[in-house]
Image: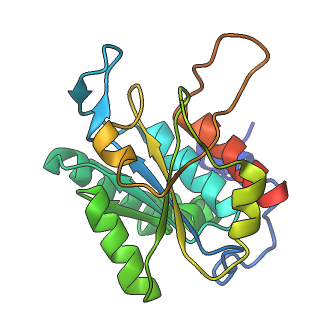
C-alpha cells in the first residue's frame, strides 16, 4: 500500500506527470472570481459566506486545466483571507507543493482580494485595459450571454472575469456591476442546485471547448 503522501501524489497528477507545469501559459485572457460577500441567502437577504477548502482547491484546478490566468477568492473577512493564505502557502511553499507539483501549479494562480472592485482594479492594472465582467446565476431572468458567443469573444484581446457567487448566489449589487450575465446551466429537470465548483468546471469546458 502506498504511503499517504505517495497516494496523494498519484491521485492528483494523473495526466500531468512528466510535464513541466511552471511555464504553461493561459489559453485565453480569462480570470475567475468567487465572491463570498455580498451574496444572498435562501430568503434573498444579503449575507456573507465562509471560504471552503474544496472551492479553493477545485476551482483552482479547473482554472489551471482550462488555462485561466488567475482565480480570485474574494472575502472582506480578515480571518477568511488568513485561512486562504494558509492553504495556499501549504500547497505552494510547504510540504504539499513538494509532494504534489500539479496541485502547486494550480494553487499558484489563486489570488485573494477583499472586494470585487479590488479584483477589477488588479486585472485592469495588470492588463492596461478595462476588464469585461460576466456574472453567473442559476436563476437568471432577462437577457444573457450564451457560452458559445462568449467563447468566441474570449479569443479577442480584452480581459474577461467570470464571477461566481457562494451561498445562494451573487447579490444584485455585484450583478449590476457586470457587463453580461452568462446563460444558466440547465439540467434534465427542474432541480438546479449545482455546487459552485461544479458550475465553474462546466462553464469553463463550454467556453473553451464549445
Residue at the limit of the structure toward the top, as seen here: 190
Please state which of residues 142 and 66 is positioned toward the viewer in this rendering.
142
Question: In the rendered view, does 110 fall on the left or right side of 82?
Answer: right
In this orientation, which residue lies closer to the viewer: 103 or 46? 46
Residue at the (33%, 38%) spot, across then down: 172
| Residue 153: image location, x then y, percent | 70, 68
- In the image shown, does 117 or 55 lie closer to the viewer? 117
Expressed as whole percent of the image width and height from the top left, the position of residue 7 reads: 69, 44
* Residue 44 located left or right of residue 25: left
Total numbered labels: 0
Image quarter in which the C terminus is found: bottom right
- The quadrant holding residue 187 is top right
The picture places residue 112, in percent across and down from the top left corner, at 32, 61
Which image quadrant for residue 4?
top right
Report the residue that reaches farthest toward the front. 142
Residue 38 lies, in percent from the top left, at 26, 40
Amino acid at each position: 500500500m502506498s504511503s499517504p503522501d505517495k497516494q496523494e501524489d498519484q491521485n492528483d497528477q494523473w495526466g500531468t506527470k512528466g510535464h513541466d507545469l511552471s511555464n504553461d501559459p493561459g489559453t485565453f485572457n480569462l480570470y475567475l472570481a468567487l465572491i463570498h460577500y455580498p451574496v444572498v441567502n435562501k430568503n434573498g437577504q444579503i449575507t456573507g459566506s465562509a471560504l471552503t477548502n474544496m472551492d479553493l482547491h477545485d476551482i483552482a484546478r479547473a482554472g489551471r486545466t482550462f488555462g485561466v490566468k488567475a482565480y480570485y477568492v474574494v472575502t472582506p473577512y480578515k480571518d477568511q483571507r488568513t485561512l486562504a493564505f494558509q492553504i495556499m502557502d501549504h500547497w505552494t511553499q510547504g510540504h504539499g507543493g513538494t509532494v504534489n507539483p500539479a496541485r502547486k501549479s494550480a494553487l499558484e494562480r489563486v489570488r485573494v482580494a477583499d472586494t470585487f472592485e479590488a479584483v477589477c482594479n488588479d486585472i485592469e492594472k495588470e492588463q492596461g485595459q478595462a476588464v469585461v465582467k460576466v456574472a453567473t446565476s442559476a436563476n437568471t431572468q432577462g437577457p444573457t450571454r450564451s457560452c458559445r458567443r462568449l467563447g468566441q469573444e474570449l479569443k479577442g484581446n480584452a480581459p474577461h472575469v467570470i464571477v461566481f457567487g457562494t451561498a445562494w448566489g451573487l447579490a444584485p449589487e455585484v450583478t449590476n456591476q457586470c457587463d453580461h450575465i452568462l446563460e444558466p446551466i440547465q439540467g434534465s429537470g427542474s432541480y438546479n442546485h449545482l455546487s459552485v465548483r461544479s458550475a465553474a468546471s462546466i462553464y469553463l469546458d463550454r467556453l473553451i471547448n464549445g
